[in-house]
Image: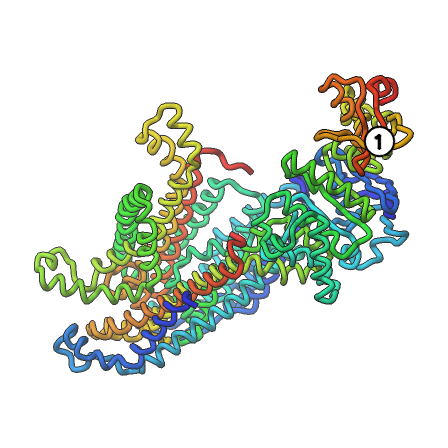
Amino acid sequence: MSITEPLRHTVPNRVIPVLGVLALALVWLLDLGTIQPNRIVPGTGHGLLSALGWTGAGLVTGVLLATTVLSMVPVRRRYELLLGLIGLSLATMPLLLDVFAALHLPEGSPYARSSVGAGFWSLLFLLSLMLIETLGRLSARRWLQLMLLVFVGGSWLVFLRGEGLESLSLVREFNARPDKFQQALWTHLALALGAVAISAGLAFALALKMIRSPAWQRPLLGAVSFLQTIPSLAVFGLLIAPLSALSSALPFLQDLGIRGIGWAPALLALIAYSLLPMVRNTFVAITEVPESLADAARGMGMNEHQVFFQLKLPLALPVIIEGVRITTIQAIGLTAVAALIGAGGFGGFIFQGLGQAAMDLVLLGALPTIALALLADALLTMLAASLKPTPATA
Amino acid sequence: MRVWLPATLLASLLLALSAGMPVLEPLFNWVQPGKQQVIYERESFLFLLQNHLMLVVVSAAVGTLVAVAGGIFVTRPFGRDFLPLVGQVASIGQTFPPVAVLALAVPVLGFGEAPILLALVLYGLLPILRNTLAGLEGIDPSVREAALGMGMSPVLVLVRVELPLAGRVILAGIRTSVTINIATAAIGSTIGARTLGDPVIAGLVNGNTAYVLQGAILIGLLALTTDSLFEALERSWDRRLQSVGV
Amino acid sequence: MIELKNVSRHFGNTIAVDGVNLTIETGEVCVLVGSSGCGKSTTLRMINRLLPYSAGEILVDGEDITTMNPEQLRLNMGYVIQGTGLFPHWTVARNIAMVPTLLNWPRERINARVDELMTLLDLDPSAHANKYPQQLSGGQAQRVGVARALAADPNILLMDEPFGALDAITRENLQLEMLRIQKQVRKTTVFVTHDIDEALKLATRIAVMDQGRIIQHDTPENILRHPASDFVENLIGKQDRGLKLMSLRPVRDLMANHTEPRQSEPGEHVLREEDSVRLALSVMLWQDLRQVAVFNAQEQETGVITRERIIQEGV
C-alpha cells in the first residue's frame, strides 16, 4: 500500500536536501565567472564570494539553505512554496552575472568581457533538477509547467537583452553577428522542420502500404532501421560524391542549389534519418487500435473509409505525434552536424567556434540548439497529451 | 552459430578495408580526379579504427556500470525517493542533441580525448539508465514478492531474478547507446579526438571527396558490424530463454 | 504453531490491522476471509515478515519472529500467491528446486524431490519439468507454485488467494487437490481468500476479518450456526445457510449401515461415504429417489441414506 495523498506534506523530502547541499558545495568551490581582458587572453576566475561580495554570496547561500530546510519540515503547501522559491531563483539567476560584471569589469575597456563559470552552470543545473523534482511531487499540470518555462525563459531573455549583461561574452558574440544568428535560426528551423514534414508524409504513405500488404513490413522496416544505424557523419559523407556527380551531369540542378555539399545532402540525410521513428510509430499506432473496436464500428454500419478516419486515425494520433516528437528532436540535433557539410544553422557557430577555440561562439551555437530541442519536446508532448481521446487516469 | 555470421563477415570486411585501403587507389582516383593524393595517410586507418573503438568501448563500459548501478540504487527501498527525478532526467537528457553535449564538454575539459570521453559517457548513460529502469520496473511484482517470500535475500533476488529478467531490456539500451556513441565519436574529430571521423573532416576541409568517402565507408561499416554483433547477442539471448520476458 | 498477540499495523492515520489475536494450531488450516482491504493479506504477510508490524508480537513455535533472520524464517514457510510468482526465466524444475537449492541440498536429493512433488501434484515430470512457466496453463502454473512452496518440506504454508485468478472448474480441482495433499502432509496452513465457500471447504477454522479486526474465529460449522454479527451473517449468506451446513457434513454421519458390506454394481454416478449430505440430497431430488445406496472406497455398498433422515437431521 502506498502512502496516501494527505500525508505528502508530512514526509520529509530526501532528494532536494541532497541537491541543495551539492549545489552549496559546488557554488562555493567552483568559479562563478571569469573576467577576460579580450577575446583571446585567458581570464581570471572568481569564486562566489569574490564574484558577488558578501551580500550576493549570502543571498545565494541563504536561498539554497532555505530550499533544503523547507523540503524537510512538515509545512502545509510546502511544495508550492518550494516551487515559487526555486522558480524565482531560476528566473533571477542572470542577475548574478549582472552584479558580477558590474563589480569586476574594468571601466573603459571595450574588449573586456565576463563569462560564465562552472559554479554558475552547476547552480543552474541543480536548481533545474530541484524544479523537476518539485513539479513531479506536485504532479503539476502541463500548463503550469509550460507557464513556468515561459516565465523563466522570458526573464532570461529580458536580462540577456538588457544593458547590464552587455559585457557577457555570449552576448558579445551574439551582438557581433545578430544577422548571422537570425539566419542560422531560420536555416536550422527550415532544415529540421522541412525534413520532419517531408518524412511525415513519406512515412504515412509507407505505413499505409505496410498495413495493406504485410509482405512489405519486414523489408521496409529493415531498410529504414538500416538507415538509422549508419552514423550521421558517414551518411553526409557518402551523399557528397553521388550528389556532386549528379549536379555536374545535370546543370539545372546546380541552378537549384543542389550540390555535393550544402542544404541538399543535409535535407536528404535528415529525411532518411527521420523515416525510422516516423514509420515505426505510425505503423504501430494504427495497427494497435484494437480490432474489436473496428469490428464494432463495421457492425454499426461504418464503411472502411469511415473506420479509418473516424476511429483508427484519432486513436492513433497521440502515438503518431510521439513519433513526430522523437523525429523533431533528432532532426534538430542532426541539423547541427550538417553544418559540417556547409548546410548552415547553429552547427555553423559550434564548428567555427571549435576551429577558432572560441568557446563562447561554441556556446552561441550549442545553447540555442539545446533550447530548440527542449522547446520542441515540450510543445509536442503537450500536443500529444491534448490529443489523447480519453482523459488520462491518475 | 549462424547468428554470428553477419557480424563476422562485416568485421572481416572492416578490418580488410582498414588495412588495405591503398589497394583501392584506382577507384578513388576515378572518384576524385586531379588530386595528387587520394588515400588518407596522415594516420593509419587501423589506428583510427582502434582509437574509435576504444572510445566507444570504454564509454559503453563505464556508462553501463554507472547506469545499471544507478538504476539498481533508485529501485531499492533506500533509493526509491530518487526514482522520479532520475527517471525524468534520463528522459529529458535524451532530448539534448549529442553534438551540443560534445560541444559543451570542450569549455569544461578542453580539446582532445578527455572531453569526448566525458560526453560519450554522459550521453551514452541515458539510454542504458532508462532501459535499466524500464527493465527493473517491468518485472511482475508477484515474482519479486514470491522470491522474497520464499526466503531469498534481497541481494539474491537482485542477482538471480531481477537482473536476469531485466537483462534483455538493458542490453537493448546498451545497443542504442553504442549506436549513438559511434556516431558522436566520429564527430569528435572536430574537437581533436583521433577517430574514423578524421578523414571525413580532413576531406571536407580540403575538398577531397576521396578522403570523405574512405572515412564514411569505414564509419558505416563499423556501425553495421557493431549493430549486427548486438543483433546476434540479442538473438542468442532470446534463443537461450525462448520466448521469456517480453 | 503460530500465535499473533495484539498485532497492529498502521501508517499515518490509516489502520490496516488493528489488534489482532489469533492462534493457529500445528497442522490446522486457518482461513482468513473477508472483503478486499480488510487486512487479511496484510496479516498473512506480517507472519513471514514481508511487512513489519507496528505493535504486538508474532510467535512461531513459541519464538518471536523479530528475533529471527527474515530469510531463515521464510525458508521454513512455504509461500503461494495469486499471480504464482514463478520465475519466468527458470524451468518448472528449477522453480520447484528453488528453496532446496538455497538450502544447499545435494543435487540428487533435489532432483528426487522435484520428481516426487510433481507427481504429488499430478504433473508429469517427463512432460513438464523442462518447460517454462509461461508455457503452462493457469492451473498447471499454480500447481507448480504449490509444489515450489512444499519443496523443502516447510512446517508452515502461507497461501495468499492462491486460486483467485483461476476459472471455476480449475479452482474446484485444485481445492480438492489441496484437501488430498493436506491429509498427507499436515502442514500448519494460513490461507487467505475472499470466497466464503472456499473458506468453508478448506478450513479447519475460519477467521472472519473486517476493517483490520477479527470478527469471529471458529470452525466452519460454528460460523454457520452461530454467526457473531450481521457482517458474518451476510458474508455466509443468510438464506442458504442450510445447504452450506449440509455440504460440510459427510454422508457417513447420516447413513444407515448394512451389517455387512455388500457386493453390487456401483454404476457411474455413485454416492460415497465421504461425499456431502448436500450432494446426496441433490441426487435424490434429481432422480426422484427416497433413498440412495452408499459405497466405500473399495467399491462395496456399505449402507443407505434416506431423504427423511436428511430432512430431519441434515442441518
Secondary element type, mark 1 = strand
**Of the pair C121 and A379, the residue shown nearer to us:** C121
Q: Nearer the viewer, residue C314 or B162?
A: C314
Q: Quick check: can you spot residue C13?
A: no
Look at the image and tell me in which quarter the C terminus of chain A lies.
top right
Image mark count: 1
Q: Nearer the viewer, residue A349 or A207?
A: A207
Q: Which residue is drawn at the image coordinates 10% and 64% (left, top)?
A: A248
- Examine the image and state in which quarter residue A138 appears: top right
Q: Considering only vertical position in the picture, is A316 above or below C116?
A: above
Instruction: Give residue A304's position: percent from left, percent from top.
Output: 32, 31
Q: Splitting the image into 4 quarters, where does residue A183 fall?
A: bottom left
The amino acid beneath tag 1 is Arg
Colouring:
rainbow
Judging depth in this view, the residue of B34 and A336 nearest the camera is B34
Q: Is residue A343 above or below residue C78?
A: below
- Quarter of the figure with the N terminus of chain A: top right
Side of A278 relative to A267 (left or right)? right
Quadrant hosting residue B153: bottom right
| Residue of label 1 | C262
Q: Residue at x 16, y 65 (%)?
A: A244
Q: Is residue A165 left or right of residue C41?
A: left
Res. A164 in view: yes
Q: Residue A191: x and y, percent?
A: 26, 54
Name the residue at 62% across, 41% down. Answer: A77
Residue C209 coordinates in the image, percent (x, y): 79, 34
Residue drawn at x 35%, y 71% is B9
- The chain carrying label 1 is C
Q: Mark 1: few, some, or many residues within 10 Å (few <14, many ≥20)? A: few
Above or below A390: residue A250 = below
Residue C297: x, y in percent? 80, 37
